[in-house]
Image: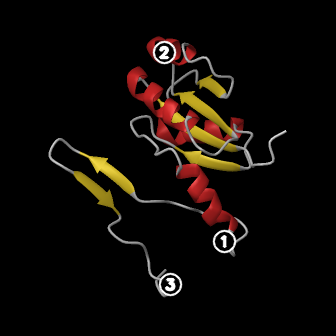
Amino acid sequence: MNSEPLVSAVIPTYNRPSLVVRAVKTALGQTHPNMEVVVVVDGPDDSTSKALGAIADSRIQMITLPQRQGGSGARNAGVQAAKGEWIAFLDDDDEWLPSKIECQLKIARCSRYRIPVVSSQIIARTPRRDYVWPTRFPQPHEH
């Protein structure tokens, strides 16, 4: 049995099969060794279900909602189905760097709060250039 905590990546999606497959692969490729990926298909969507079904990995759980609920409803359904001690949200058009979860867990474990919320910078890629947001982290005296 793995001694590392289970992290559930929750990915809502609808009608974007190639994007969600890419997102799922980055969640499965994390350096943190104990991951599950909960993909919530937000309403009937055969092409996305078929694309996800082609990924042979037992860590993937696919839920198809009977009707569209929107991103928030799909995320909530994913959280309800998740088995992890930690929840990590990933949008279907985003990718994670391989050590994202490992780094965030290290920070969360050092938190003085019982239920920490950990976020990170993002790299937004455009045809013209990459942007890193936020440009700086809060200082210790800032909220």
**Residue at image mark 2:** 51
Instruction: Specify few, some or many for label 1: CA neighbours under 10 Å numbering under 14, 14-19, or 20 or more.
Output: few
Amino acid carrying label 3: it is Pro
- CB contact under 8 Å: marks 3 and 2: no
Secondary element at tag 3: loop
Residue 140, numbered label? 3
- At 19% from the left and 49% from the top, the residue drawn is 129
Name the spot of residue 77 as percent of width and height, x first.
63, 36
Instruction: Specify few, some or many for label 3: CA neighbours under 10 Å numbering under 14, 14-19, or 20 or more.
Output: few
Amino acid carrying label 2: it is Ala
- At 50% from the left and 42% from the top, the residue drawn is 90
- At 54% from the left and 13% from the top, the residue drawn is 54
Q: Earlier in the sequence, mark 3 or mark 2?
A: 2
Amino acid carrying label 1: it is Ser
Q: Quadrant of residue 20?
A: top left
Q: From this viewpoint, is residue 15 visible?
A: no
Q: Nearer the viewer, residue 62 or 35?
A: 35
